[in-house]
Image: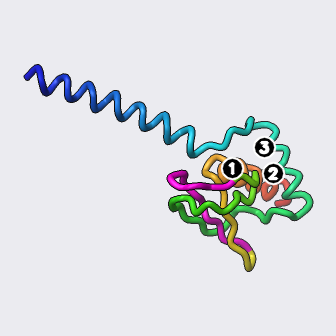
Amino acid sequence: MRGSLAGLEASIAGSEARAALVEQLVIPDLPDEPLRRQVRAQLAARQLFLADGVSSVRRGTGRPCTVCGHPIDSPTLEREVEGPGIVARAHPACYVIWREESMARQRKAG
């Protein structure tokens, strides 16, 4: 019984360490507000399309993030976003901001 408790504690500690590592790998080290301003500017200049279409998630391919420009290396997750005749890639955190700002623009326009 005692051995199984120690094993469970080690497993939990290992899971927490892995979760912290994954969180560091998935989210680029950019403050939220400057990235949000950058996304707004890119949307206004039509350098980014509105992220309102189909998207999928997969392991990073090493290609740059369409939003922040940093590479999306494996094992970081990569959000692949379909746009008008184009496929873009983004870190999950970049995609969330891109999606939020896209939806805000649509609400203002509508």
Q: Is residue 75 above or below residue 9?
A: below
Distance from disc 2 to disc 3, alpha carbons, whole Å, reads 6 Å
Label 2 element class: helix
Q: Are marks 1 and 2 in contact (CB under 8 Å)?
A: yes
Q: Residues within 10 Å of mark 1 (few under 14, many from 20)?
A: many
Residue at left 56%, top 43%? 25
The quarter of the picture where residue 35 lies is: top right
What amino acid is found at the position of numbered circle 1 in the picture? Answer: Cys
Q: Is residue 80 covered in magenta?
A: yes
In the picture, measured across the screen, residue 36 lies left or right of residue 25, that is right
What amino acid is found at the position of numbered circle 2 in the picture? Answer: Val
For marks 1 and 2 on the same chain, the one whose residue lies earlier in the sequence: 2
Give the colour scheme shown.
rainbow
Q: Is residue 64 covered in magenta?
A: no
Q: Position of residue 78 (x, y in %)?
A: 58, 58
Distance from disc 1 to disc 3, alpha carbons, whole Å, reads 8 Å
Query: For mark 2, what is the residue?
Result: 39
In the picture, measured across the screen, residue 9 lies left or right of residue 49, that is left
In the picture, measured across the screen, residue 55 lies left or right of residue 106, that is left
Label 1 element class: helix
Find the magenta span and give its range. Answer: 71-83
Query: For mark 3, what is the residue?
Result: 35
Residue at left 60%, top 51%? 92
Q: Are marks 1 and 3 in contact (CB under 8 Å)?
A: yes
Q: Is residue 86 above or below residue 99?
A: below
Q: Nearer the viewer, residue 95 or 7?
A: 7
What amino acid is found at the position of numbered circle 3 in the picture? Answer: Leu
- Point out the image quarter for the C terminus: bottom right
Residue at left 79%, top 37%? 33
- Point out the image quarter for the N terminus: top left
Q: Residues within 10 Å of mark 3 (few under 14, many from 20)?
A: some
